[in-house]
Image (cartoon, rainbow, N blue to C red):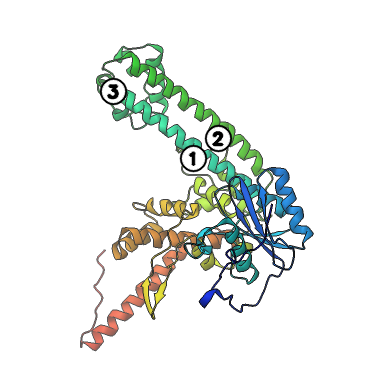
Amino acid sequence: MAWKKSKKQQPKHAGQGGAVPSLSCIEPNAAGIDIGATEIFVALPQDRDPSPVRRFETFTEDLHRLKDWLRQHGITTVAMESTGVYWIPLFQILERAGLEVCLVNAHHVKHVPGRKTDVIDCQWLQYLHSVGLLRASFRPEDRVCAIRSLLRHRDSLVQMATVHVQHMQKALTQMNLQIHHVLSDITGQSGLAILQAIVKGERNPVVLAQLRDYRVKASEEVIVKSLVGDYRREHLFTLGQSLEAFRYYQSLMAACDEEIEEQLQTFDRRLPPEAPPLPPDPNAHRRRKNEFHFDMRTELYRILGVDVTAVPAIHALTGYTLLAEVGTDWLAKFRNMEAFASWACFCPHNKKSGGKILSAKTRKSANRVNRALRMAAQSLERDKSHLGNYYRKMCARLGKPAGITATAHKLARILFHMITTKQPYDESIFAAEEQRQRKRMESKLKRKAHQMGYTLVPLARTI
Protein backbone atom coordinates (compact mmCIF):
# COMPACT_ATOMS: atom_id res chain seq x y z
CA MET A 1 0.00 0.00 0.00
CA ALA A 2 1.34 3.44 -0.91
CA TRP A 3 0.79 6.89 0.55
CA LYS A 4 0.90 10.25 -1.15
CA LYS A 5 2.72 12.68 1.02
CA SER A 6 0.05 15.12 2.20
CA LYS A 7 0.75 18.46 3.74
CA LYS A 8 -0.02 17.22 7.23
CA GLN A 9 2.39 14.33 6.82
CA GLN A 10 5.33 16.54 5.85
CA PRO A 11 7.91 15.96 8.60
CA LYS A 12 9.02 19.31 9.99
CA HIS A 13 12.51 18.20 10.84
CA ALA A 14 13.91 21.30 12.49
CA GLY A 15 14.04 25.05 12.36
CA GLN A 16 11.39 27.70 12.78
CA GLY A 17 8.07 27.38 11.00
CA GLY A 18 8.82 23.80 10.00
CA ALA A 19 11.50 24.74 7.47
CA VAL A 20 13.91 21.95 6.58
CA PRO A 21 17.48 22.86 7.60
CA SER A 22 20.09 23.23 4.90
CA LEU A 23 22.05 20.09 5.72
CA SER A 24 24.04 18.44 2.98
CA CYS A 25 22.89 15.00 1.89
CA ILE A 26 25.55 12.43 2.76
CA GLU A 27 23.59 9.27 1.93
CA PRO A 28 21.48 9.96 -1.20
CA ASN A 29 20.50 6.27 -1.48
CA ALA A 30 19.16 6.00 2.09
CA ALA A 31 15.78 4.64 3.17
CA GLY A 32 14.01 4.64 6.52
CA ILE A 33 11.98 1.79 7.99
CA ASP A 34 9.54 1.85 10.91
CA ILE A 35 8.99 -1.69 12.18
CA GLY A 36 5.97 -3.06 14.01
CA ALA A 37 4.63 -6.47 14.95
CA THR A 38 2.22 -6.77 12.00
CA GLU A 39 3.19 -3.99 9.56
CA ILE A 40 6.26 -2.15 8.33
CA PHE A 41 6.42 1.35 6.85
CA VAL A 42 9.24 2.23 4.43
CA ALA A 43 10.21 5.70 3.19
CA LEU A 44 12.37 6.41 0.12
CA PRO A 45 13.91 9.69 -1.07
CA GLN A 46 11.29 11.92 -2.67
CA ASP A 47 12.72 11.65 -6.20
CA ARG A 48 12.69 7.83 -6.36
CA ASP A 49 9.00 7.04 -6.55
CA PRO A 50 5.67 8.91 -6.96
CA SER A 51 4.58 7.27 -3.69
CA PRO A 52 7.76 7.31 -1.59
CA VAL A 53 6.12 5.72 1.49
CA ARG A 54 4.72 2.19 1.42
CA ARG A 55 3.32 -0.25 3.95
CA PHE A 56 4.29 -3.93 3.99
CA GLU A 57 3.05 -6.78 6.13
CA THR A 58 5.50 -8.83 8.19
CA PHE A 59 5.07 -12.15 6.39
CA THR A 60 8.26 -13.53 4.88
CA GLU A 61 7.16 -13.07 1.27
CA ASP A 62 6.25 -9.45 2.05
CA LEU A 63 9.72 -8.87 3.51
CA HIS A 64 11.24 -10.13 0.26
CA ARG A 65 8.94 -7.82 -1.71
CA LEU A 66 10.18 -4.97 0.47
CA LYS A 67 13.77 -5.93 -0.29
CA ASP A 68 13.09 -6.05 -4.04
CA TRP A 69 11.34 -2.66 -3.93
CA LEU A 70 14.37 -1.10 -2.22
CA ARG A 71 16.82 -2.56 -4.73
CA GLN A 72 14.58 -1.55 -7.64
CA HIS A 73 14.91 2.12 -6.59
CA GLY A 74 18.68 2.01 -6.06
CA ILE A 75 18.68 1.97 -2.25
CA THR A 76 22.04 0.92 -0.79
CA THR A 77 21.62 1.72 2.92
CA VAL A 78 18.66 1.47 5.28
CA ALA A 79 18.00 2.81 8.80
CA MET A 80 15.65 1.04 11.20
CA GLU A 81 14.91 1.11 14.91
CA SER A 82 15.78 -1.83 17.14
CA THR A 83 12.17 -2.54 18.14
CA GLY A 84 12.05 -5.64 20.35
CA VAL A 85 12.94 -8.66 18.21
CA TYR A 86 10.73 -7.63 15.28
CA TRP A 87 13.69 -6.17 13.39
CA ILE A 88 15.73 -9.39 13.27
CA PRO A 89 14.07 -11.18 10.28
CA LEU A 90 14.10 -8.05 8.11
CA PHE A 91 17.65 -7.19 9.16
CA GLN A 92 18.92 -10.61 8.12
CA ILE A 93 17.09 -10.52 4.76
CA LEU A 94 18.41 -7.05 3.89
CA GLU A 95 21.92 -7.89 5.03
CA ARG A 96 22.02 -11.03 2.88
CA ALA A 97 20.83 -8.92 -0.07
CA GLY A 98 23.93 -6.73 0.24
CA LEU A 99 22.25 -3.66 1.72
CA GLU A 100 23.96 -1.75 4.50
CA VAL A 101 21.61 -1.80 7.49
CA CYS A 102 21.95 0.88 10.17
CA LEU A 103 20.27 -0.42 13.33
CA VAL A 104 19.71 2.55 15.64
CA ASN A 105 18.61 2.99 19.24
CA ALA A 106 15.01 4.21 19.43
CA HIS A 107 15.99 6.72 22.16
CA HIS A 108 18.37 8.44 19.74
CA VAL A 109 15.74 9.21 17.09
CA LYS A 110 12.83 10.55 19.11
CA HIS A 111 10.50 12.74 17.09
CA VAL A 112 8.81 15.96 18.11
CA PRO A 113 6.12 15.18 20.73
CA GLY A 114 2.53 15.20 19.54
CA ARG A 115 3.27 14.32 15.91
CA LYS A 116 3.76 10.57 16.11
CA THR A 117 2.64 8.29 13.27
CA ASP A 118 4.27 5.36 11.56
CA VAL A 119 4.46 7.27 8.26
CA ILE A 120 6.21 10.24 9.84
CA ASP A 121 8.55 7.94 11.78
CA CYS A 122 9.89 6.21 8.69
CA GLN A 123 10.28 9.56 6.88
CA TRP A 124 12.11 10.98 9.88
CA LEU A 125 14.48 8.00 9.94
CA GLN A 126 15.11 8.37 6.21
CA TYR A 127 15.91 12.07 6.59
CA LEU A 128 18.24 11.62 9.58
CA HIS A 129 20.08 8.79 7.84
CA SER A 130 20.44 10.70 4.57
CA VAL A 131 22.17 13.63 6.31
CA GLY A 132 24.41 11.34 8.39
CA LEU A 133 22.94 11.98 11.83
CA LEU A 134 22.44 8.33 12.80
CA ARG A 135 24.95 6.01 14.38
CA ALA A 136 24.52 2.26 14.00
CA SER A 137 24.30 0.08 17.08
CA PHE A 138 26.97 -2.56 17.62
CA ARG A 139 26.11 -6.01 16.27
CA PRO A 140 28.64 -8.88 16.03
CA GLU A 141 28.96 -11.35 13.20
CA ASP A 142 26.40 -14.09 12.55
CA ARG A 143 28.16 -16.97 14.30
CA VAL A 144 28.63 -14.81 17.40
CA CYS A 145 24.95 -13.85 17.25
CA ALA A 146 24.10 -17.57 17.20
CA ILE A 147 26.12 -18.15 20.39
CA ARG A 148 24.55 -15.06 21.95
CA SER A 149 21.04 -16.31 21.20
CA LEU A 150 21.81 -19.71 22.74
CA LEU A 151 23.43 -18.21 25.84
CA ARG A 152 20.52 -15.87 26.43
CA HIS A 153 18.11 -18.78 26.02
CA ARG A 154 20.19 -20.75 28.52
CA ASP A 155 20.01 -17.85 30.98
CA SER A 156 16.22 -17.93 30.73
CA LEU A 157 16.28 -21.69 31.44
CA VAL A 158 18.37 -21.05 34.55
CA GLN A 159 15.90 -18.41 35.72
CA MET A 160 12.93 -20.72 35.18
CA ALA A 161 14.68 -23.53 37.06
CA THR A 162 15.27 -21.11 39.93
CA VAL A 163 11.54 -20.41 40.13
CA HIS A 164 10.87 -24.10 40.74
CA VAL A 165 13.57 -24.20 43.42
CA GLN A 166 11.64 -21.45 45.19
CA HIS A 167 8.46 -23.51 44.85
CA MET A 168 10.22 -26.47 46.50
CA GLN A 169 11.40 -24.27 49.36
CA LYS A 170 7.86 -22.93 49.81
CA ALA A 171 6.41 -26.45 49.98
CA LEU A 172 9.03 -27.47 52.55
CA THR A 173 8.25 -24.42 54.67
CA GLN A 174 4.51 -25.15 54.56
CA MET A 175 5.26 -28.67 55.86
CA ASN A 176 7.65 -27.17 58.47
CA LEU A 177 10.60 -29.11 57.08
CA GLN A 178 13.68 -26.97 57.71
CA ILE A 179 16.11 -28.99 55.60
CA HIS A 180 16.56 -26.11 53.13
CA HIS A 181 17.85 -23.98 56.03
CA VAL A 182 20.22 -26.66 57.26
CA LEU A 183 21.75 -27.50 53.86
CA SER A 184 23.50 -24.67 52.04
CA ASP A 185 22.01 -25.79 48.70
CA ILE A 186 18.78 -27.73 48.48
CA THR A 187 19.58 -28.64 44.85
CA GLY A 188 22.93 -30.17 45.74
CA GLN A 189 23.69 -33.88 45.92
CA SER A 190 22.35 -34.33 49.45
CA GLY A 191 19.32 -32.09 49.00
CA LEU A 192 18.12 -33.75 45.80
CA ALA A 193 18.58 -37.22 47.25
CA ILE A 194 16.50 -36.34 50.33
CA LEU A 195 13.79 -34.61 48.28
CA GLN A 196 13.53 -37.55 45.90
CA ALA A 197 13.12 -39.95 48.83
CA ILE A 198 10.40 -37.75 50.37
CA VAL A 199 8.49 -37.66 47.07
CA LYS A 200 8.71 -41.47 46.81
CA GLY A 201 7.11 -41.85 50.25
CA GLU A 202 9.90 -42.00 52.81
CA ARG A 203 8.97 -40.23 56.07
CA ASN A 204 11.47 -41.57 58.63
CA PRO A 205 13.84 -38.65 59.39
CA VAL A 206 16.64 -40.98 60.46
CA VAL A 207 16.52 -42.84 57.14
CA LEU A 208 16.37 -39.55 55.23
CA ALA A 209 19.34 -38.18 57.16
CA GLN A 210 21.45 -41.15 56.05
CA LEU A 211 21.18 -39.90 52.45
CA ARG A 212 23.36 -36.86 53.17
CA ASP A 213 26.83 -36.55 51.65
CA TYR A 214 29.85 -36.96 53.93
CA ARG A 215 30.90 -33.37 53.16
CA VAL A 216 27.79 -31.86 54.79
CA LYS A 217 28.88 -29.85 57.81
CA ALA A 218 25.61 -30.12 59.71
CA SER A 219 25.42 -32.98 62.18
CA GLU A 220 23.09 -35.93 61.76
CA GLU A 221 21.09 -34.83 64.82
CA VAL A 222 20.35 -31.40 63.29
CA ILE A 223 19.37 -32.93 59.95
CA VAL A 224 17.02 -35.39 61.67
CA LYS A 225 15.31 -32.53 63.53
CA SER A 226 14.93 -30.55 60.30
CA LEU A 227 13.12 -33.48 58.64
CA VAL A 228 10.36 -33.76 61.22
CA GLY A 229 7.23 -31.98 60.00
CA ASP A 230 3.64 -32.17 58.80
CA TYR A 231 3.69 -34.14 55.55
CA ARG A 232 0.44 -32.93 53.98
CA ARG A 233 -0.72 -34.40 50.69
CA GLU A 234 -1.22 -31.11 48.81
CA HIS A 235 2.25 -29.84 49.71
CA LEU A 236 3.85 -33.16 48.79
CA PHE A 237 2.15 -32.96 45.41
CA THR A 238 3.52 -29.43 44.88
CA LEU A 239 6.98 -30.56 45.98
CA GLY A 240 6.94 -33.49 43.55
CA GLN A 241 5.88 -31.40 40.57
CA SER A 242 8.42 -28.67 41.35
CA LEU A 243 11.19 -31.26 41.66
CA GLU A 244 10.18 -32.84 38.35
CA ALA A 245 10.10 -29.43 36.66
CA PHE A 246 13.52 -28.56 38.06
CA ARG A 247 15.03 -31.77 36.70
CA TYR A 248 13.35 -31.13 33.34
CA TYR A 249 14.94 -27.70 33.02
CA GLN A 250 18.29 -29.20 33.99
CA SER A 251 17.95 -31.62 31.08
CA LEU A 252 17.07 -28.73 28.76
CA MET A 253 20.20 -26.91 29.91
CA ALA A 254 22.32 -29.99 29.18
CA ALA A 255 20.88 -30.18 25.64
CA CYS A 256 21.51 -26.45 25.20
CA ASP A 257 25.14 -26.98 26.28
CA GLU A 258 25.58 -29.63 23.60
CA GLU A 259 24.30 -27.21 20.95
CA ILE A 260 26.59 -24.43 22.23
CA GLU A 261 29.60 -26.76 22.17
CA GLU A 262 28.79 -27.73 18.59
CA GLN A 263 28.40 -24.09 17.53
CA LEU A 264 31.74 -23.20 19.14
CA GLN A 265 33.50 -25.56 16.74
CA THR A 266 32.83 -23.06 13.92
CA PHE A 267 35.24 -20.59 15.53
CA ASP A 268 38.83 -20.64 14.33
CA ARG A 269 41.74 -21.38 16.61
CA ARG A 270 43.41 -18.08 17.56
CA LEU A 271 46.26 -19.50 19.59
CA PRO A 272 49.71 -18.73 18.13
CA PRO A 273 51.92 -21.77 17.42
CA GLU A 274 54.27 -20.89 20.28
CA ALA A 275 51.45 -20.45 22.80
CA PRO A 276 52.05 -22.35 26.04
CA PRO A 277 49.53 -24.98 27.13
CA LEU A 278 46.73 -23.85 29.38
CA PRO A 279 47.80 -24.10 33.03
CA PRO A 280 45.68 -26.27 35.32
CA ASP A 281 42.70 -24.62 36.92
CA PRO A 282 43.27 -24.24 40.69
CA ASN A 283 39.50 -24.24 41.26
CA ALA A 284 38.75 -27.25 39.07
CA HIS A 285 37.43 -29.23 42.06
CA ARG A 286 34.86 -26.50 42.76
CA ARG A 287 32.20 -26.77 40.09
CA ARG A 288 30.01 -23.70 40.16
CA LYS A 289 26.27 -23.91 39.81
CA ASN A 290 24.87 -23.84 36.26
CA GLU A 291 28.25 -24.31 34.59
CA PHE A 292 28.36 -25.76 31.11
CA HIS A 293 28.65 -29.51 30.71
CA PHE A 294 31.92 -29.26 28.76
CA ASP A 295 35.39 -27.85 29.32
CA MET A 296 34.52 -24.16 29.19
CA ARG A 297 38.00 -22.87 29.95
CA THR A 298 39.80 -24.82 27.23
CA GLU A 299 37.31 -23.80 24.53
CA LEU A 300 37.54 -20.16 25.60
CA TYR A 301 41.35 -20.29 25.49
CA ARG A 302 41.26 -21.76 21.98
CA ILE A 303 38.81 -19.17 20.62
CA LEU A 304 40.13 -16.00 22.28
CA GLY A 305 43.81 -16.96 22.15
CA VAL A 306 44.43 -15.93 25.77
CA ASP A 307 43.37 -17.20 29.20
CA VAL A 308 40.98 -14.53 30.47
CA THR A 309 40.22 -16.65 33.55
CA ALA A 310 43.71 -15.81 34.83
CA VAL A 311 42.34 -12.37 35.76
CA PRO A 312 41.00 -12.42 39.33
CA ALA A 313 37.18 -12.49 39.49
CA ILE A 314 36.84 -13.42 35.78
CA HIS A 315 35.23 -16.83 35.52
CA ALA A 316 34.65 -18.85 32.37
CA LEU A 317 30.96 -17.87 32.43
CA THR A 318 32.00 -14.21 32.32
CA GLY A 319 34.34 -15.02 29.44
CA TYR A 320 31.50 -16.55 27.45
CA THR A 321 29.40 -13.45 28.08
CA LEU A 322 32.20 -11.39 26.53
CA LEU A 323 32.42 -13.79 23.59
CA ALA A 324 28.66 -13.75 22.96
CA GLU A 325 28.22 -9.98 23.26
CA VAL A 326 31.42 -8.73 21.56
CA GLY A 327 32.88 -11.58 19.53
CA THR A 328 36.55 -12.35 18.92
CA ASP A 329 37.85 -9.45 16.81
CA TRP A 330 37.54 -6.59 19.29
CA LEU A 331 40.03 -4.31 17.55
CA ALA A 332 37.93 -4.31 14.38
CA LYS A 333 34.86 -3.12 16.29
CA PHE A 334 36.47 -0.69 18.76
CA ARG A 335 39.34 1.64 17.89
CA ASN A 336 40.85 1.44 21.40
CA MET A 337 40.10 0.35 24.95
CA GLU A 338 38.55 3.74 25.75
CA ALA A 339 35.93 3.19 23.04
CA PHE A 340 35.19 -0.28 24.40
CA ALA A 341 34.82 1.04 27.97
CA SER A 342 32.49 3.77 26.70
CA TRP A 343 30.35 1.24 24.81
CA ALA A 344 30.14 -0.87 27.99
CA CYS A 345 28.86 2.25 29.86
CA PHE A 346 31.80 2.59 32.25
CA CYS A 347 32.75 6.14 31.23
CA PRO A 348 31.24 9.41 32.50
CA HIS A 349 28.34 10.68 30.42
CA ASN A 350 28.72 14.44 30.63
CA LYS A 351 25.63 16.64 30.41
CA LYS A 352 26.50 20.30 29.86
CA SER A 353 24.32 23.37 29.68
CA GLY A 354 25.36 27.00 29.84
CA GLY A 355 28.98 26.00 30.19
CA LYS A 356 28.27 23.97 33.33
CA ILE A 357 28.40 20.21 33.81
CA LEU A 358 24.98 19.14 35.07
CA SER A 359 25.86 15.48 35.50
CA ALA A 360 28.82 13.19 34.87
CA LYS A 361 27.30 9.88 35.90
CA THR A 362 27.69 6.78 33.79
CA ARG A 363 24.80 5.96 31.47
CA LYS A 364 22.15 3.50 32.59
CA SER A 365 22.16 0.55 30.26
CA ALA A 366 21.05 -3.07 29.93
CA ASN A 367 24.46 -3.95 28.49
CA ARG A 368 25.24 -7.53 29.54
CA VAL A 369 28.99 -6.92 29.49
CA ASN A 370 28.44 -4.07 31.94
CA ARG A 371 26.42 -6.32 34.23
CA ALA A 372 28.90 -9.22 34.06
CA LEU A 373 31.94 -7.06 34.84
CA ARG A 374 30.13 -5.31 37.70
CA MET A 375 29.34 -8.68 39.25
CA ALA A 376 32.97 -9.72 38.76
CA ALA A 377 34.14 -6.52 40.45
CA GLN A 378 31.95 -7.16 43.50
CA SER A 379 33.49 -10.62 43.92
CA LEU A 380 36.87 -8.94 44.59
CA GLU A 381 35.76 -7.71 48.01
CA ARG A 382 37.84 -10.29 49.90
CA ASP A 383 40.33 -11.11 47.17
CA LYS A 384 43.99 -10.84 48.17
CA SER A 385 45.25 -9.84 44.71
CA HIS A 386 46.21 -6.35 43.56
CA LEU A 387 42.81 -6.00 41.90
CA GLY A 388 41.19 -6.81 45.23
CA ASN A 389 43.27 -4.07 46.88
CA TYR A 390 42.26 -1.69 44.10
CA TYR A 391 38.56 -2.49 44.59
CA ARG A 392 38.72 -1.86 48.34
CA LYS A 393 40.69 1.35 47.84
CA MET A 394 38.19 2.69 45.29
CA CYS A 395 35.24 1.80 47.51
CA ALA A 396 36.85 3.58 50.47
CA ARG A 397 37.62 6.65 48.39
CA LEU A 398 34.50 6.93 46.20
CA GLY A 399 31.85 4.84 47.93
CA LYS A 400 30.58 1.37 47.05
CA PRO A 401 28.65 2.13 43.82
CA ALA A 402 31.40 4.27 42.28
CA GLY A 403 34.05 1.82 43.50
CA ILE A 404 32.31 -1.04 41.68
CA THR A 405 32.13 1.07 38.51
CA ALA A 406 35.82 2.02 38.71
CA THR A 407 36.90 -1.60 39.24
CA ALA A 408 34.66 -2.89 36.44
CA HIS A 409 36.15 -0.19 34.19
CA LYS A 410 39.64 -1.43 35.04
CA LEU A 411 38.63 -5.03 34.33
CA ALA A 412 37.24 -3.96 30.94
CA ARG A 413 40.53 -2.27 30.02
CA ILE A 414 42.58 -5.27 31.14
CA LEU A 415 40.45 -7.71 29.14
CA PHE A 416 40.55 -5.51 26.03
CA HIS A 417 44.34 -5.35 26.21
CA MET A 418 44.68 -9.11 26.73
CA ILE A 419 42.33 -10.11 23.91
CA THR A 420 43.66 -7.63 21.35
CA THR A 421 47.38 -8.16 22.08
CA LYS A 422 47.20 -11.86 23.08
CA GLN A 423 49.39 -11.08 26.09
CA PRO A 424 48.71 -13.14 29.23
CA TYR A 425 47.68 -11.54 32.49
CA ASP A 426 50.73 -10.36 34.45
CA GLU A 427 50.21 -9.54 38.13
CA SER A 428 53.70 -8.06 38.48
CA ILE A 429 52.64 -4.98 36.47
CA PHE A 430 50.43 -3.90 39.35
CA ALA A 431 53.23 -4.43 41.88
CA ALA A 432 55.53 -2.17 39.83
CA GLU A 433 52.79 0.45 39.54
CA GLU A 434 52.23 0.39 43.30
CA GLN A 435 55.96 0.86 43.85
CA ARG A 436 55.99 3.90 41.54
CA GLN A 437 52.95 5.31 43.30
CA ARG A 438 54.67 4.84 46.66
CA LYS A 439 57.73 6.74 45.45
CA ARG A 440 55.57 9.59 44.16
CA MET A 441 53.82 9.79 47.53
CA GLU A 442 57.15 9.86 49.40
CA SER A 443 58.43 12.65 47.16
CA LYS A 444 55.23 14.63 47.76
CA LEU A 445 55.49 14.21 51.53
CA LYS A 446 59.16 15.25 51.56
CA ARG A 447 58.36 18.33 49.50
CA LYS A 448 55.55 19.40 51.81
CA ALA A 449 57.64 18.74 54.91
CA HIS A 450 60.46 20.85 53.49
CA GLN A 451 58.04 23.71 52.79
CA MET A 452 56.90 23.62 56.43
CA GLY A 453 60.44 23.43 57.81
CA TYR A 454 60.51 19.75 58.68
CA THR A 455 62.58 16.82 57.53
CA LEU A 456 61.21 13.33 57.02
CA VAL A 457 63.31 10.62 58.63
CA PRO A 458 62.52 6.99 57.73
CA LEU A 459 62.04 4.63 60.64
CA ALA A 460 64.60 1.90 61.14
CA ARG A 461 63.14 -1.48 60.28
CA THR A 462 63.29 -4.00 63.07
CA ILE A 463 63.97 -7.61 62.20
Task: Measure how far apart labels 2 and 3 are at the Cα level.
Answer: 34 Å
Q: Is residue 287 above or below residue 246?
A: below
Residue at image x 45%, y 66%? Answer: 347
Q: In the image, is residue 448 above or below residue 332?
A: below
- Is residue 8 something that shows in the picture? yes
Q: Is residue 456 above or below residue 227?
A: below
User: Which residue is farthest left?
Assistant: 453
- The x and y percentages for residue 205 are 30, 15
Q: Which residue is mark 2?
A: 293
Q: On the image, numbered disc 1 is attached to which residue?
A: 284
* Left/right of residue 68 with respect to residue 18 in the rendered view: right
Viewer-proximal residue among 99 and 124 = 124
- Circles 3 and 1, Cβ within 8 Å, touching? The answer is no
Which residue: 50% across, 29% down?
249
Type of residue at label 2?
His
- Quick one: label 3 or label 1, which is nearer the N terminus? 3
x then y, percent, for residue 374:
42, 54
The answer to which of 154 and 454 lies nearer the viewer is 154
Do the CB atoms of the residues marked 2 and 3 lie less than 8 Å apart?
no
Name the one closer to the observer, 425 or 391.
Answer: 391
Residue 340, relative to residue 275: is it above or below? below
Instruction: Using the rendered image of the protein, determine whether residue 268 is visible from the camera's viewpoint.
Output: no
Which of labels 2 and 1 is toward the front? 2
Crowdedness near tag 2: few (<14), some (14–19) or many (≥20) residues, C-alpha within 10 Å: few
The amino acid type found where label 1 is placed reads Ala
Q: What residue is disc 3 on? A: 174
Residue 328 point in image, percent of width and height:
62, 55
